[in-house]
Image (cartoon, rainbow, N blue to C red):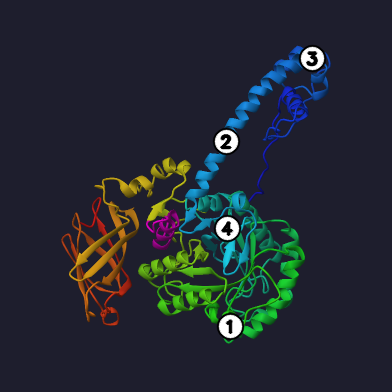
Amino acid sequence: MRQLYEGFKKTVVAAGICICCLGLTACGKKEAQQAVEQETVQMQENETVGKQAADGADDLKNAEADKETENRGTEHDADTQSSTDAASEVNEKDAAAEQKSMENGDYILARPSQNGALSVKGTQLVDEKGQAVQLRGTSTHGIAWFPDFVNQDAVTQLSKDWGANLFRIAMYTDENGGYCTDGDKENLKTLVTDGVEYAKQADMYVIVDWHILHDSNPLTHKAEALQFFREMTEKLKGEKHVLYEICNEPNSGCSWEDIKTYANEVIPVIRENAPEAVILVGTPTWSQEIEKPQNDPITGYDNIMYTLHFYAATHKEDLRSKMVNAVEAGTPVFVSEYGLCDASGNGGNDLGQAQSWIDTMDQHGISYAVWSFCNKEETSALIASSCRKTSGFTREDLSESGKWIMDMLHTVKTEDGSTQTVVDSKDKTQNQNNGSGVSERTEADETEGKTGTDVSEKRLNSGNLSVDAKLTGSWESEGRTFYQYQLTITNNGEADVSSWEISLQFSDTITLSDGWNGEYQADGSTLTIHSLDYNSEIEKGASTADVGFIVSAAGTLEIE
């Protein structure tokens, strides 16, 4: 089902262009950028030189024999050179504009074609120019069970339609069908290398993930890991877009000492063929004890990062604080797996906590990959279980998790802290006419019908409290438009407050879909929010955040 990517066919070019390029070089002029390769076309011996020039396809030797053709070719190529220079200038401007649009706050959303090989500087991923970058994308489920989702069309859609710049390939090691148990090793390795190539063609970075889980301790299958990474890095030698994750989620008593022992054997093997590739190292307790490498890092190697995994409905402020503390202490952190639901992968989504995690990771430039790109019948799957497609997904083909993730990946932070929706202009028409009956969000959708108010963030006053209401996402479903807001409530008074209540007035009747860190009541176009026990007290000059909600309306909605 999967086919190797076919290279571009060589294009026949006029012999006069080649002569002109030589002439320009002799004159000391800048060489024209070569966009295509020359291919000599066999012509019949009795054709005249004039016929050769008209056809523009004879070989260089015959073209040199005709002075008139050479002169005409030189004049023509001078015009071509001018046009090429002009086009090059336009392309440079377009590339600069594209690079600027591909930023998320302080961090560039890197693409291999623009940013090259990545490395680690301090706590941050950086590109070949030393610029701080961020990767945001998706992980497969186990490729032994969901191989059909590793295909070129699907990966390209993640890149172009969703805005992802990272694809993680999860190869289980110990479960049924795992690489180290009864799995087809050759087929699994082919899936990995195919996925790496698909990511390259989609201009995405890719993680090769040695996905330990049931085996708990990476030392269990150390010998197989050494063989796998030696063979895989040999095959992928020179591929600048590849990162290696050497142990997904150590668990069940696996110690940091065990992980370090394993890493100190695997890393040198990877370094034999990939001397500068970024390597991700898992941490104890399903990659949650990020304080372990903070206090006892692996030494002797560059370009090492440590993974933290979370599921938003289970892991909340405590684990987020551990992550932030680790980064502030100098630990390079990479969230190579997360979900919107609980840690089982199949509980209810907590979109409020998920947004808090995204905001925190974006603030610190932490890269992340969501679990998982498949149609498994569980909450964390991004594709609806009823969907039988393996590419060409419309919005209605996505699960709740998939819709939220696609919307989030479309949204980036701007310099002033507000949000902006970024959609590839080539995809706007396709999205609006995808046959699903649901139009995708575009930047125009974000501002249509507004009356000069920046709806991405608005400040309101309620007595001594000020409320910053930030619109973090909006989408359409079943004829209604949904709006997700994040609130920061600040006490501007001269005394502490022991509880709080705020009312938000909207421009139309609302329906409350979800709310977090508050008690919510919707009545017509008014939403009233009461504090809870744990966030009721706000000291003077202090704020409480992580308060948020999702409401929907029949049409365009504003906070008045």
The residue at which mark 1 appears reads as 295
Indicate which disc, 1 or 4, sits on the residue closer to the N terminus. Answer: 4
* Identity, as a three-letter code, of the amino acid under mark 2: Glu
Rounded to the nearest angstrom, the CA distance separating label 2 from label 3 is: 33 Å
Query: Does the rendering let one see residue 80?
Result: yes
Callout 1–callout 4 Cβ contact below 8 Å: no
Q: Position of residue 84 (x, y in %)?
A: 62, 30
Q: Residue at x 44, y 61 (%)?
A: 385
Nearer to me, 292 or 32: 32
Tell us which disc is closer to us: 1 or 4: 4
Residue 164 rendering spot, x and y as whole percentages: 51, 55
Q: Earlier in the sequence, mark 2 or mark 3?
A: 3
Residue tagged by mark 2? 89
Q: Which residue is mark 4?
A: 131
Label pair 4/2, CB-CB below 8 angstroms: no
What's under tag 3, amino acid-wise? Lys
Horizontally, residue 276 falls left or right of residue 42, namely left
Rate crowding at label 1 as few (under 14), some (14 to 19) or many (20 or more) other CA atoms within 10 Å.
few
In three-dimensional space, the C-alpha distance between marks 4 and 3, rounded to whole angstroms, equals 51 Å
